[in-house]
Image (tube, grey):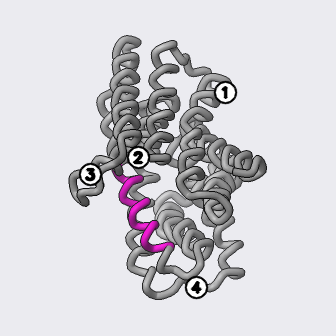
Amino acid sequence: MPVDIMLAILFGAALHATWNAFVRSAPNKFMDTVLVLVGMGFWAGCLLPFAPLPDAASWPYLTASVAIHVAYFALVVITYRYAELSFAYPIMRGVAPAFSAVFAAYLLQESPSFVGWIGVFLISGGVVLLSLDALRLGSLNPRSFLFALSNAGVIVVYTLVDGVGVRLSGNAMSYIGWVFFLPVVPIFVTLLVRRRGPTARYALQHVVRGLIGGACILGSYGIALWAMTRAPIALVAALRETSVLFAMVIAALFLAEQISRWRFVSILAICAGAIAIKLS
């Protein structure tokens, strides 16, 4: 893989961890998530006039993906209310490949390779170690753990749905643009109707934060799609899993979260396991 593509993928992984850090550090996690989504929708809306409509065959998948993404962002908000970034993010992002491998093995009879199963066990061990470390420190919240695991499952579902939908769309950027634009409309309209005054004041105070966060979401996925047209998909997917490590660095340097020795080892195990699955 060329160095420029590798650096671009790593940058995209850092962007993904960054917007999660924005939500985790926000004083009002719900409002900041809405602002980030509006920023995402704004940038996606700027791109849509320059892309054709997705082919009609992809519309059912597009509709399903919009609903699933709304659930995903809602779970992100709920999870970060109770958990640190360095705890929740590795579970949400790292466990998803393990779920996919296990589902494929038992539902589709597509068993992972030996390396793939090693990845599953690395992730499982990392999650157990991460949970035990949180329990040792007295910071384990069962709700945050369950919400993070649930969101890992949601990630698997929207990945499968979008994997089919984008292939039927005829234009990947158009499909992703609509996926990012459509969920924002009902959320923002509902919020304006029900909480017009507080919403406007908060939005004006944090508009830059929302635009930057939205650009991080769109940039992360856009870079991944671009990279997949120029490098093997498995390698791109594996490198994107380094977002787990970026989240750990951001949590330690900017959110003042304590990364114990065991949490550090567990996050490395989850990241290594996710990469192993993607490369298997």
Q: Earlier in the sequence, mark 4 or mark 2?
A: 4
Write the start and end of the magenta stretch as one range. Answer: 153-166
Q: Is residue 55 above or below residue 108?
A: below
Q: Residue sitting at 46 percent across and 52 percent down?
A: 73
- Mark 1 crowd level (few <14, some 14–19, many ≥20, 10 Å Cα): few
Q: Earlier in the sequence, mark 3 or mark 2?
A: 2
Q: Helix or strand or loop: what does disc 4 sit on? A: loop
Return the residue at label 4.
53
For residue 127, what is the image quadrant? Answer: top left
Return the residue at label 2.
97
Residue type beneath disc 4: Leu
Q: Helix or strand or loop: what does disc 2 sit on? A: helix
Cα–Cα span, label 3 and label 1 = 39 Å
Residue 204 in view, yes or no: no
Residue type beneath disc 2: Pro
Q: Residue 133, how many percent across, how many down?
A: 39, 16
Return the residue at label 3.
105
Cα–Cα span, label 2 and label 1 = 27 Å
Q: Helix or strand or loop: what does disc 3 sit on? A: helix
